[in-house]
Image (spheres, rainbow, N blue to C red):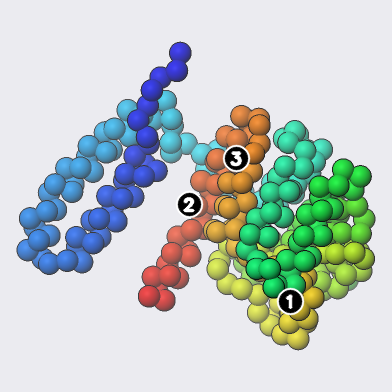
Amino acid sequence: MRIAVTPNPSLSSIPDFFANATKLLRGNQEQNMTNIHPFFGKLVSLLNEKRKNDRYLASDFNVFDYIQPDELKLSRIIADLFDPKGSHGQQRICLEAFVEAMIERTSEEQPLRKTLTKLQKAVRDDECFVIARTEVATRHGRRMDIVVNIGGKNGIVIENKPWANDQKDALGDYADEAARRFSNCWVLIYLHGTGKAADEYMISKKKLQKLEVDGNFFNTDYTYFLIRWLKICLERVEAEKIRCFLHDFIGYIEKEFRSGFFNEEINDA
């Protein structure tokens, strides 16, 4: 028997309440005193409604609260979702969605768009094998966080830095390694959780400019890009167990990383 439940206040009404409360507190002091009590009365009502709904929705429950993944575990999760033969059973859906999410963030005139279009074609070609691995060693003893080999000649290399900055010249070395491994097309992705873009400590300005001109570099983040990718996956995967996992993964990223981006926006305002 399906039980009808009203929309979860924790996902919409409660944030709206605090947004309105913030506007109120910034307004006239006399107006604040007049209207503040109705606002908090509404909040109590919303919280009571949420408590009833949570018997069926468990909106605050998230498996990642118990896992507390580190950088390596996050890399493994992402790589596993890329793997067409992974236990998720969704074949290439998540990898296709990842390339599509990157294309969304580029314009027609960018060289990167041409590279991504080639990668998209390779990913969709069933004759191209796909191997996703983590902690892949380079010739110089470094370890690339995620490497996706697409048919042997195409590839995606991801430097996953959710919390810490990279090592000196690491991105430059990974670019050299990607160029050596993949003769057709490849992209080096700097995936960060702090909102800080790649700097000259990680890769020389000259090399970074060349990568951008050649369409081989994609700088992006957890808060906006990774969530967008996971939401595309959420729309397309067919296994309910995987949908629940993706939903929790999105919630974890929003909780863990989004506040840092918002703080930067507030400081810049």
Above or below, 222 against 17 in this view is below
**Horizontal side of residue 160 vs 58, given as left or right:** right
Residue found farthest to the front: 108
Q: Is residue 85 left or right of residue 254?
A: right
Name the residue carrying label 1: 212
On screen, 175 above or below 49?
Answer: below
Mark whose residue sits in front, 3 or 2: 3
Judged from the image, the secondary structure of the residue bearing numbered disc 3 is: helix
The location of residue 116, given as percent across then percent down, is 76, 61
Residue 85, compared with residue 264, is above or below; it is above
Near-viewer residue (228 or 118): 118
Q: Distance between the Cα atoms at labels 2 and 1?
A: 31 Å
The percent position of residue 101, horizontal first and vertical second, equals 65, 55
- Depth check, mark 2 against mark 1: the one in front is 1
The label shown at residue 235 is: 3
Q: Residue at x 45, y 18 (%)?
A: 2
Image quadrant in which you'd find residue 91: top right
